[in-house]
């Protein structure tokens, strides 16, 4: 049975788009997530922070040639939660 | 948001990942051209490359190391431009990274024991090409790797073969042609 907290988190379309994209890749940057989720920088930052606080995604900040960069990836917990969420969605359909 | 809508969002987000194999094709073409050019230069101008005891070793180590720095930089830049890395990209990166380390190891051992590293490097390269071709499901790379493996095995039984020409023929058929076909193939979008 899926965690209610996860279900609530993934009810938001931006968070759902972000985590669905992250499950299909190893890692991605912020710009790609803006394109995928079709949202604004500020809103996306807030939603990603919530996913990170719930332990569903990892955020890695680093510098490349003096430019700050951020990579996002899904965690083991995130994968498991997403799979459970997807399974339940398909059962309910 | 109902269940159908959620499933549609998941489906659309997953479908936005595109596997682009063009950079891998570029890497194969780049390395085959570098090594073929170096082999031909060494073959036609041995008096320049072998002017001293260690000059050939310096020639065959320094240029590939510069090539490694260039391709690593190209792959990092390309990764930033694409914006994401797929699981397949990671697997390919690890395999070729291991090949790079193994190449350094083979060259170091061959320097210590004063033997040619060509056949060992070609053998390892053919295995890595076959693995890459099978993983990315691209037959030209797999066939190129098998061809290179057969050619390398043949060269072991013919010690009189010029190893520089073995390099040129082996890499042209095993790496350059498959690399070009990978580079110019249509992307699966």
Image: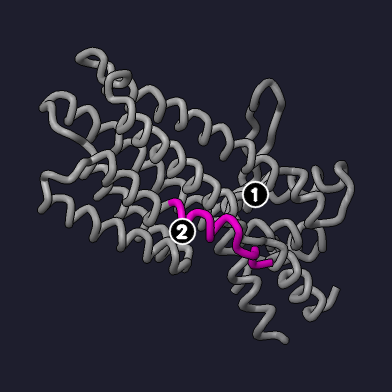
Residue B181 painted magenta: yes
Distance of label 1 from label 2 (alpha carbons) = 25 Å
Judged left or right of residue B157, residue B178 is: right
> In the picture shown, does residue B89 fall above or below A85?
above
Judged left or right of residue B172, residue B183 is: right
Judged left or right of residue B150, residue A28 is: right
Q: Which residue is mark 1?
A: B84
Tags 1 and 2 touching, CB below 8 Å: no
Q: Magenta segment range?
A: B176-189
Q: Quadrant of residue B119?
A: top left
Q: Chain of mark 1?
A: B
Q: Quadrant of residue A14?
A: bottom right
Q: Which residue is mark 2?
A: B178
- Rendered-image quadrant of the N terminus of chain A: bottom right
Nearest to the eye among marks 1 and 2: give it. 2
Earlier-in-chain disc, 1 versus 2: 1
Give x and y (percent) for residue B69. 49, 28
Give x and y (percent) for residue B129. 37, 55
Residue B182 painted magenta: yes
């Amino acid at each position: 049975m899926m965690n209610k907290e996860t279900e609530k988190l993934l009810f938001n379309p931006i968070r759902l788009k972000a985590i669905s994209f992250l499950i299909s890749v190893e890692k991605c940057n912020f710009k790609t997530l803006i394109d995928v989720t079709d949202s604004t920088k500020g809103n996306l930052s807030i939603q990603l922070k919530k996913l990170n606080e719930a332990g569903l995604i990892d955020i890695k900040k680093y510098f490349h040639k003096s430019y700050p960069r951020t990579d996002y990836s899904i965690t083991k917990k995130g994968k498991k939660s997403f799979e459970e969420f997807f399974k339940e969605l398909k059962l309910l359909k | 948001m109902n269940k159908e809508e959620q499933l549609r969002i998941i489906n659309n987000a997953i479908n936005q990942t595109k596997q682009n194999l063009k950079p891998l094709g570029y890497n194969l073409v780049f390395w085959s051209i570098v090594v073929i050019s170096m082999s031909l230069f060494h073959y036609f101008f041995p008096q320049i490359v072998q002017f001293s005891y260690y000059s050939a070793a310096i020639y065959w180590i320094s240029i590939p190391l510069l090539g490694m720095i260039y391709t690593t930089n190209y792959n990092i830049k390309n990764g930033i431009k694409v914006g994401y890395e797929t699981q397949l990209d990671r697997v390919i990166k690890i395999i070729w990274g291991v090949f790079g380390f193994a190449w350094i190891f083979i060259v170091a051992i061959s320097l210590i024991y004063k033997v040619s590293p060509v056949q060992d490097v070609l053998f390892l390269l053919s295995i890595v090409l076959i693995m890459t071709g099978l993983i990315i499901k691209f037959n030209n790379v797999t066939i190129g790797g098998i061809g290179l493996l057969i050619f390398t095995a043949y060269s072991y039984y013919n010690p009189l073969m010029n190893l520089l020409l073995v390099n040129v023929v082996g890499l042209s058929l095993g790496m350059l042609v498959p690399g070009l076909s990978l580079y110019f193939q249509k992307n699966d979008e």
